[in-house]
Amino acid sequence: MRIGVSTSCFYPMETELSFQTLAEQGVEVCEVFFNTWSELEEPILRRLLKIKDEYAIHVPAVHPFFSFAEHYLLFSEYERRFYDALDLFEKYFEAAQALGAKILIIHGAKANTPVDDKLYFERFAKLMERGKPYGVRVAQENVVHYLSESPGFLAAMGEYIGDDFSVVLDIKQALRAGRCVNEYIETLPESIVHVHLSDYTPAKDCVPPGEGEFDFKQFFKRMEEIKYGGEYIVELYRHSFTDEKSPARSADFLSKYLHKNM
């Protein structure tokens, strides 16, 4: 278990430049957030691979830029579009495999998407199957205003899909949904495979870890109790910090907390 940073922290800086910036700041674990099609192919993907190898960076997960449209592409009533979208996701799986990433994160369907839960679960399972030949597991993130904001919905997904079901726990998304982070931990202790970290204040729901009120000591203790073995990734919005070194500094700050609990 290590603390890393997402390239999304510097959006709209180009992905490879974000990756390079974090590498130069000494970050050893990075989640790569792709922002457009060309980043899945040469020459940009080659540039990402070069940075990864040059700085010996571990990439545990990738995040598609399809998040805004996954409900439309994967979970609409138009079945043909779903199967076409599966083919589109092949490029993500290929890029993830090239980077050595084992997890692909999706937001899924918005809360008002007109598909029933069973159909959602079936399609998610089919997307999971597409990732397996690449050694990539598809993981459902909890996201406000999406079906996945509900721990109960995620639990039902897990019951339907079985042991392969994987969840990305995002602290800021839980807070935005008016949920306690522990709700997800207690409901999905064996399904959480990846975690997005951030902090909060009464005025802001996303600030760099260490600058807010979130109890990371207690959080890491609880994650240790459920035997969590994945990575922790600092994921912030660019407007939530002013110093370019804040994400890397947050990772260092959190590493000390993590190691105290181990």
Image: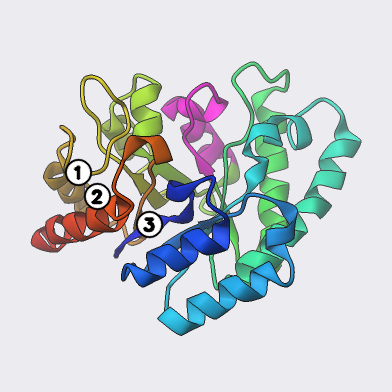
Residues 44 and 218: in front is 44
Mark 3: few, some, or many residues within 10 Å (few <14, many ≥20)?
A: many
Does residue 60 appear anywhere in the picture?
no
Query: Residue 219: x and y, percent?
Result: 19, 43
Q: Which residue is mark 1?
A: 219
Residue 5 marker: 3
Residues 44 and 4: in front is 44
Compared with residue 97, is residue 227 higher up or lower down, i.e. above or below? above
Residue at 13% x, 60% y: name it: 256
Compared with residue 28, is residue 81 higher up or lower down, i.e. above or below? above
Residue at 31% x, 52% y: name it: 247
Q: Image quadrant for the N terminus? A: bottom left
Q: Earlier in the sequence, mark 3 or mark 2?
A: 3
Which is in the foreground here, disc 1 or disc 3?
3
Residue 223 marker: 2
Instruction: Report the side of 178 relative to 249 (left or right).
Output: right
Q: CA distance from mark 2 to mark 1?
A: 6 Å
Q: Residue furthest right?
A: 80
